[in-house]
Image (spheres, coloured by chain):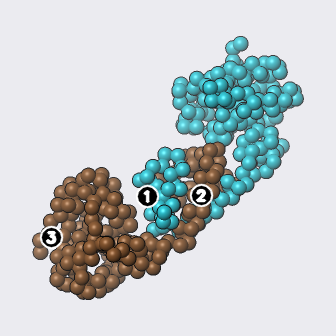
Chain colours: A cyan, B brown
């Protein structure tokens, strides 16, 4: 395979990129963005090599504990559980939330072998048992599996005397949190309601 | 800027990739495609470093003369002029063309300072003067600038006793060759007509 074919092939690992888009990307870089291509190559190598997971919240982090968890200015009484780093980022960018996060890196899905252990819920339980957290904001996606995960997390929270809540208004059913517009997400996050037992 | 932010930023050099898509790409690579990300990084570095232009046809090539120009099985009597390497690839994949190519790497655009010299037309003239080429297939895009370029190339061909032709049927006016479906492009290429003086 020529270098050009290898490059086109390699671009296809990206989400939503098929043969035509991959060709277009490869030609664009070679025709007009060689410096940018070099920069992307280096950023990819560094990121893949050096970005791991935060020991506290499981979000992506270059350091053992991420900047948010290490920050002295966040409210340690609120903890927000999300499915993915992208969901965490969406909430951070759209809302004024100043508490901490816990990134599940997935959702409960017994058929796929994803149970509480795979989502680090033992670590979350320890965290809730420490007594600092007063509210667990459960911001899993409003899908079947996301709702099941939310239900499980709410029970876990109550077991440790922590109040579970869930963003409500405006998040469309069956949608993905990551793609909700900022205004809707901000409203839903602000008007969250306590979960009924 | 964190490594993650640098990666998201670097993805934005790609065509059609905005902030949201760039985030999605970065998270996708980190969550599910680390090996693929490493491969893309290496492919990009090699391509940017080692892919230059063929001395004969100006197409992208890792070697001084590209594989097509060096091939003994191509018909040296036909030469096809295209605007970009992507157009060349589209024709090569869609049609049964067995002649050679000349890649302009652009189109005549005096206002942008792109004249005959920038398109390597001095080299094309030498090539036509050699006497081997009998037909110049002018497959520039059916846009205003592409048509003007075609007109110029047709005159150049006639000056050297070479018959100019142009793919006709089916290529939609104002469209881009690169995006025409294979069937239409193949038909247009096959039914090309001689250009009137």
Residue A90: mark = none
The number of numbered discs placed on residues in the rendered structure image is 3
The residue wearing badge 3 is B195
Chain letter of mark 2 equals: B
Q: Quadrant of residue B157?
A: bottom left
Give the Cα distance between marks 1 and 3: 30 Å
Q: Does residue B117 lie above or below A55 as drawn?
A: below
Q: Quadrant of residue B39?
A: bottom right
> Could you tell whether A122 is left or right of B81 in the image?
right
The residue wearing badge 2 is B39
Residue at mark 1 shares a chain with residue at mark 3: no
Callout 2: helix, strand or loop? helix
Mark 1 vs 3: CB contact within 8 A: no
Q: Nearer the viewer, residue B192 or A185?
A: B192
Residue A171 pos. (x, y %): 56, 28
The residue wearing badge 1 is A24
Q: At x 50% / y 56%, what residue is drawn?
A: A9
> Could you tell whether B145 is left or right of B38 in the image?
left
Q: Nearer the viewer, residue B4 or A100?
A: B4
Q: Quadrant of residue A94?
A: top right
């Amino acid at each position: 395979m020529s270098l050009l074919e290898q490059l086109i092939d390699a671009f296809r690992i990206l989400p939503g990129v098929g043969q035509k888009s991959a060709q277009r990307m490869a030609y664009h870089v070679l025709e007009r963005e060689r410096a940018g291509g070099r920069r992307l190559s280096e950023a990819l190598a560094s990121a893949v090599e050096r970005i791991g997971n935060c020991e506290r919240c499981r979000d992506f982090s270059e350091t053992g504990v991420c900047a948010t968890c290490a920050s002295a200015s966040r409210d340690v009484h609120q903890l927000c559980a999300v499915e993915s780093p992208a969901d965490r980022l969406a909430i951070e960018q759209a809302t004024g939330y100043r508490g901490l996060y816990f990134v599940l890196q997935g959702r409960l899905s017994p058929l796929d072998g994803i149970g509480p252990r795979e989502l680090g819920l033992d670590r979350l339980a320890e965290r809730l048992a420490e007594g600092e957290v007063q509210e667990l904001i459960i911001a899993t996606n409003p899908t079947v599996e996301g709702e099941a995960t939310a239900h499980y997390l709410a029970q876990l929270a109550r077991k440790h005397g922590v109040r579970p809540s869930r963003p409500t208004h405006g998040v469309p059913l069956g949608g993905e949190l990551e793609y909700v517009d900022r205004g809707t997400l901000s409203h839903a996050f602000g008007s969250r309601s306590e979960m009924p037992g």
